[in-house]
Image (cartoon, helix red, strand yellow):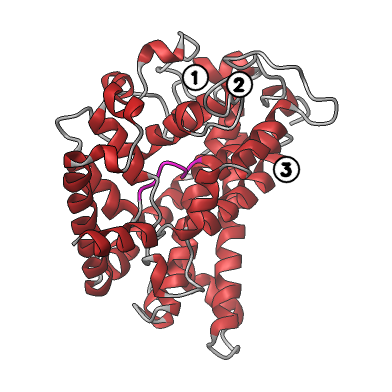
Amino acid sequence: MNNFKKLGQFKSTGRFFNEKNSSYRTPFQRDRDRIIHSASFRRLKHKTQVFVNTEGDHFRTRITHSIEVSQIARSIAKYLKLNDDLAETLSLAHDLGHTPFGHAGENSLKECMINHGGFDHNLQTLRIVMFLENKYLKFKGLNLTFETLDGLLKHNGPILNVSRVNNIIGIKNLKNKFNFNQYSSLESQISNISDDIAYNNHDIQDGLNANLFKLEEILEINFFKEIFKRYKNVKKNKILIYQIIRDSIDLMVKDIISNSKKNLKKHKIKNLRDIKKNNFKIINFSENFQQIDSELKKFLRSKMYNNKKVLSKNTKGQKIIKYLFAYICKNPKKFIKNQKINKDKFRSVSDFISGMTDRYAINLYNNLK
C-alpha cells in the first residue's frame, strides 16, 4: 500500500502548554523520553505483572512487559510505515497507572473508591502524565502531545463511560480536545494489540518457568501444536520454549499486518480523517487468530490466573491495599501534602497507593500493623 504513510500520526496538533519544538527530536520522541525519565516508569520495575515482584528475579514485571510491548508495536508500525515513535511511546506508557499487585490490586482499589469516583488504571495513567509527574517549572504533568494523550485515553477504544472520565480526570481539564466516540490513531490500536500479544505469550512462558503447567499442556492448544511440529525431533527444554514463543509472536504479528491491510482496503481508508470517522477497529487479528487469542486467554485464566498459588498472593495483595487505604484515609497528613488532601482526600489517597511498588506497599503494611 503505497500511500499508507498518510495514515500515520506524523505531525502533532500541539500540547496543552505551548513549547518550542526541538531541533533534533520530534514531538513524539520527546513524549517517549519524558515517559522513560518519569518516576512512574521507573517504579514499574517493582510492580507485579502476574507474580508478585518479591518472588523471583526472572519473572516479568510491568516495566519488562512495557518494553516488550513497545518492541512489538515498533516492529508493526515501522513495517506499515506508520509513526513507530508514537507507537513506542504509547506502549511504554500504557501501564503507568497500574497499582501494586497487578489486576488484583486494581480490583481492590476499585472497591475502596467505589463511592469516591472510582478507579481505572488506564485513566490513572492519564492522571499521572497530566497532573502527578511534576518536573517542569512552567506546568504540571509531562505536557505530552494531544496525540499521545488521545492514544492513552482510548487505549481500549472509544470511551463509553464519560462520567468515569469526568470523575477521575475532569472533563474540563481535557478542554474539548478529544472526541470520546472516535477510535484513536492506528499507532494507538497497534499499541493495544501488541499489549495482547506480549502478555499472552510471555505469561505462558512465565507460567512454564514457574511450573504452573507443563509444555505438554500448552501443546494441547492446536496453535502451539502446529508450531511444535516444526521441532518434533528437538529435545523439550527451555530453549525450545523460547523458540515456540518467538514463533507464536511472529505468526501473530504477520496476521495483524495482513489483516490490517485488508481492513484498510475493505473500509476504503485513505487518510487520517477516515480513520477517526470509522467505527471499526482497523488494527486487528483475523477471525482465525481472534479465536486463537481467545483460546490462549482461556488457557491462562484456567491454568495461571486462577492457580491457587497465584490467587493466594493476590488475596494477600488485596488485603494490603484495603488496609493501607483505610489507614491512610484516617491519617492522610502523615503521608500526603495538605494541598492535595484539601482538594480531594480520597483521590489523593488513591493516587498515593496506586503509585506504590509491591515492595513499598508490603513494607509499609508490615510497619503499620
Q: Is residue 117 above or below residue 103?
A: above
* Image-based side of 268 in relation to 6, left or right: left
Instruction: Say which residue appears at 60% left-offset and 66% top-offset.
Output: 247
Residue 238 location (% of width, % of height): 55, 83
Instruction: Say which residue appears at 16% left-offset and 41% top-offset.
Output: 330
* Image-based side of 212 in relation to 174, left or right: left
Tell me if mark 2 has few (under 14), some (14-19) or many (20+) residues whose alpha carbon lies within 10 angstroms of its own: some
Quadrant (top left/top right/bottom left/bottom right) for the C terminus: bottom left
Q: Is residue 91 above or below residue 292?
A: above
Residue 126 location (% of width, % of height): 45, 30
Which span of residues is magenta-colored? 94-99
SS type, badge 3: helix
Residue 154 in view here: no
Residue 278 has which mark? 1
Question: What is the count of numbered marks?
Answer: 3
Q: Main structural element of the magenta stretch: helix, strand or loop?
A: loop
SS type, badge 1: loop
Quick one: label 3 or label 2, which is nearer the N terminus? 3
SS type, badge 2: loop
Distance between the Cα atoms at labels 2 and 1? 8 Å
Residue topped by disc 3: 79
Eye-nearest disc, 3 or 2:
3
Q: Amino acid at mark 2?
A: Ile
Residue topped by disc 2: 269
Residue 53 in view here: yes
Q: Is residue 104 above or below residue 144?
A: below
